[in-house]
Amino acid sequence: MNERHPEEERPRQAARPAAVPRHIAIIMDGNGRWAQRRNLPRTRGHEEGATSVREVVRECSRLGVEYLTLYAFSIENWKRPRREVDFLMRLLGTFLVRETKALMDQNVVLDAIGRLDDLPATVRRKLHDTIVKTRPNTGLRACLALNYGGRTEIIDAARRIAEEARAGKLDPAAIDEGSFRRYLYADYDGEPFPDPDLLIRTAGEMRLSNFLLWQASYTELYVTDVCWPDFRGEQLRLAVEEYGRRERKFGALKGK
């Protein structure tokens, strides 16, 4: 009898049809409004939103999406009431511990971008542990944007470039789009993520909210009135179907 290696038992990611985005980014909005409409505390909306994360990760894996970036906690979110921020940090820590097994079972790699050093020490430790455990996986790469801001990302990249130029390691005249993006969060610390093909925003707001400002230059936008706690596999498939009906020209003329 042939012995099976552990990696052979991991589920294979589905083949990605041409109409399925390679990289989906999501602004997960509406947890508070979902709760308020049901006369529930805002924390209940965040808890239900964590379930949506689980369902969307599973559906992306099933569809063959290669990259998923979730806007989980922004730089601006620190301005919320202290009690809510503390709850969100505890929920994040609990989610990371609870979902590690599911991520392993689904062959998902977890990553994170943002000013991660400013997160609470307990959260940083749990995040690091989950990232390390899932690193050998070969399926969907799911990235949490934590303590993240698009402008902050660009500023941090500019600072690193300036430091290397001052040290004589970089010729400023040689900087172009390709070299600049290597200093962005998603490229600086590991294997580069491609720009998102599709950016989904829930709860009906028509703005980027400081999310992936550099990377989303030619990203297709999809806005739904559905609040994040109600956004599950079916809603994701509707967004992907809409994406499949669009023609991406990247500034060129049709047929050119």
Image (tube, rainbow, N blue to C red):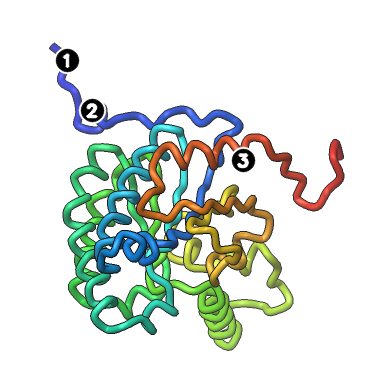
Give the mark nearer the N terminus: 3 vs 1: 1
How far apart are the two marked residues, 1 and 2, measured between alpha carbons? 13 Å
Q: Which mark is residue 243?
A: 3
**Which residue is rendered at x = 39% and y = 77% of the image?**
77
Give how far across and how far down residue 136 sits, in percent: 29, 45
Tell me the residue that label 1 is attached to: 2
Secondary structure under tag 1 reads loop
Q: Are marks 1 and 2 in contact (CB under 8 Å)?
A: no
Q: Of the residues tagged 2 and 3, which is closer to the observer?
A: 3
**Which residue is rendered at x = 65% and y = 62% of the image?**
178
How far apart are the two marked residues, 2 and 3, measured between alpha carbons? 33 Å
255 left or right of 177 in image: right
Please identify the quadrant where the C terminus is shown.
top right
Kind of residue sitting beneath label 2 = Glu
In the image, residue 66 sits, relative to residue 78, either above or below, namely: above
In the image, residue 222 sits, relative to residue 246, either above or below, namely: below
Tell me the residue that label 2 is attached to: 9
Secondary structure under tag 3 reads helix
Give how far across and how far down residue 128 sits, in percent: 25, 63
- Count residues near mark 1 (Cα–Cα under 10 Å), then give few for <14, some for 14-19, many for 20+: few
